[in-house]
């Protein structure tokens, strides 16, 4: 019912222009002030719903970079708020969760505890506290009923599967939906998250670019970790210098490509609210509820096929994609067309250095989805292996953040160092 109110609210603000063409809605019907009210409505509804609906809002806050500026601008501020804030839980509810999870004497575990939340996320909120040994800590508390709400959201997602089948006829929507559901439900288990965070912390201990807070205590619905303060990435996106943007982007990309090899894991929730730049210049990484488990590192075919595409090895690329399940068995694909489809996506790593931008992402989004474009036609013919779902989602999310940052760096060098199969696609790469 709340989600249904979003288009109704939008329509209510648009009545003044009912006689105008719908295609001109943003420019002709809605004034800037009306769009801002609509954006605030989006934030209010998605923030109150939390759960899967708020995750949708967080995803939108990443991909606003792909929207035309006149559409994106009024929503950017409201959606970005979903990365760090949402309407908070009542204090009594917070104390109730702590008592159930840590016992009636939960206060004795802390020297101090701040009842006002420092941050809020899709299924929990974070409080500042001081552990009994004097360490500043972050206490993440799961919203009561968050599990039931998220499961309900995911049941609705499965009911939408036939619609996705129409959009992408060759996708195994059922398997993809199951994979997505399993990964999202893992975020409800804070003990599993603690295990994941410990793996990341160990892998990046002493790293000059990246720092992961240590886990102090964990139960199924409460997670206590070191408090490591930093300047939020959203703030750097909004007002950082180019040097700060470049440094943040470099660190984010290094985390993305190095974690599978170093920790056997991929941080799978790359929205800006999960990152900050610490006082020592390192990228502080928060929230490990969503992670892809890659004990063998990133699949070697990702690096191999990326490099073969850059090198123009069209037949090898099509054969490799077919072998991985991206090209349906009976689909006849022109190898040259496949290169023309893929190579523009790889522009950031085609040369020595590249600056990500909203303009570049909008151009690619238009190319891949534009009605009647050759790329869109080919895209609709492709299949999608469920095992690549999370890797693809995280990569696209990370690219969205890099475009928000407008970061410049030598991205290809990061792949050369960390992505198996990229440096030597013919098979002698020791990472294979």
Image (tube, rainbow, N blue to C red):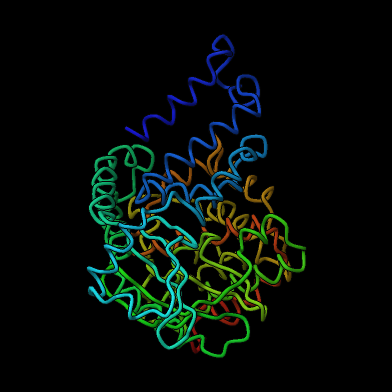
Residue 134: x and y, percent?
Answer: 47, 86
Choose between 335 and 5: the one closer to the eye.
5
The answer to whether any part of residue 16 appears in the image is yes
Q: Give the position of the C terminus as an image quadrant.
A: bottom left
- Vertical side of 425 occupied by 42: above or below: above
Residue at image position (41%, 49%) is 54
Image check: 24 left or right of 96? right
Q: Position of residue 114 (x, y in %)?
A: 45, 67
Residue 346 lies, with reference to residue 29, above or below; the image says below
Q: What residue is shown at x 73% (from left), y 68% (from top)?
A: 244
Check the image and name the residue furthest to the top: 19
How many numbered badges does the structure rendering display? 0
Instruction: Looking at the picture, tell me which residue is in the foreground, 259 or 312.
Output: 259
Quadrant in the rendering for residue 320: bottom left
Residue 418 at x, y percent in the picture: 55, 80
Q: Is residue 249 above or below residue 427?
A: above
Residue 397 in the figure: left or right of residue 290: right
Tell me residue 7's x, y (percent). Answer: 44, 28
Camera-side residue of 27 and 238 = 238
Q: Quadrant of the N terminus?
A: top left
Residue in view at x 77 percent, y 68 percent: 243
- Image quarter for residue 314? bottom right
């Amino acid at each position: 019912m709340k989600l249904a109110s979003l288009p109704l609210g939008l329509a209510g603000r648009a009545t003044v222009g009912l006689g105008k063409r719908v295609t001109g809605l943003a420019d002709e019907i809605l004034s800037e002030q009306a769009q801002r009210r609509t954006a605030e409505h989006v934030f209010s509804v998605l923030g109150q719903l939390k759960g899967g609906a708020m995750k949708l809002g967080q995803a939108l806050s990443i991909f606003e970079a792909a929207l035309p500026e006149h559409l994106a601008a009024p929503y950017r501020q409201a959606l970005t708020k979903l990365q760090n804030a949402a309407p908070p839980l009542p204090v009594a509810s917070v104390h109730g969760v702590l008592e159930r999870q840590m016992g009636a004497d939960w206060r004795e575990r802390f020297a101090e505890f701040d009842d006002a939340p420092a941050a809020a996320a899709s299924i929990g909120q974070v409080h500042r506290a001081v552990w009994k040994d004097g360490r500043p800590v972050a206490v993440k508390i799961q919203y009561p009923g968050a599990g039931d709400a998220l499961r309900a959201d995911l049941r609705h997602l499965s009911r939408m599967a036939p619609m996705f089948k129409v959009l992408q006829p060759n996708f195994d929507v059922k398997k993809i939906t199951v994979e997505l559901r399993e990964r999202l439900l893992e975020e409800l288990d804070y003990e599993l998250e603690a295990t994941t965070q410990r793996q990341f912390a160990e892998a990046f201990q002493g790293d000059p670019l990246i720092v992961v807070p240590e886990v102090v205590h964990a139960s199924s619905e409460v997670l206590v970790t070191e408090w490591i303060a930093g300047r939020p990435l959203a703030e750097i996106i909004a007002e950082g210098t180019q040097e700060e943007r470049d440094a943040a982007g470099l660190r984010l990309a290094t985390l993305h490509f190095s974690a599978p090899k170093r920790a056997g894991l991929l941080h799978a929730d790359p929205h800006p609210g999960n990152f900050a730049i610490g006082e020592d210049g390192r990228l502080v990484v928060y929230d490990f509820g969503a992670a892809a488990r890659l004990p063998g590192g990133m699949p070697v075919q990702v690096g191999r096929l990326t490099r073969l595409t850059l090198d123009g090895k069209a037949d090898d690329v099509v054969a490799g994609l077919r072998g991985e399940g991206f090209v349906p068995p009976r689909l006849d694909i022109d190898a040259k067309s496949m290169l023309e489809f893929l190579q523009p996506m790889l522009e950031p790593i085609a040369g020595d250095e590249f600056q990500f931008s909203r303009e570049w992402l909008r151009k690619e989004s238009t190319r891949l989805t534009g009605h009647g474009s050759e790329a869109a036609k080919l895209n609709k013919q492709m299949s999608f292996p469920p095992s690549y779902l999370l890797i693809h989602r995280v990569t696209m999310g990370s690219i969205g953040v890099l475009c928000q940052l407008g970061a410049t760096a030598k991205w290809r060098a990061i792949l050369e160092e960390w992505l198996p199969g990229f440096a030597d696609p013919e098979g002698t790469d020791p990472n294979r």
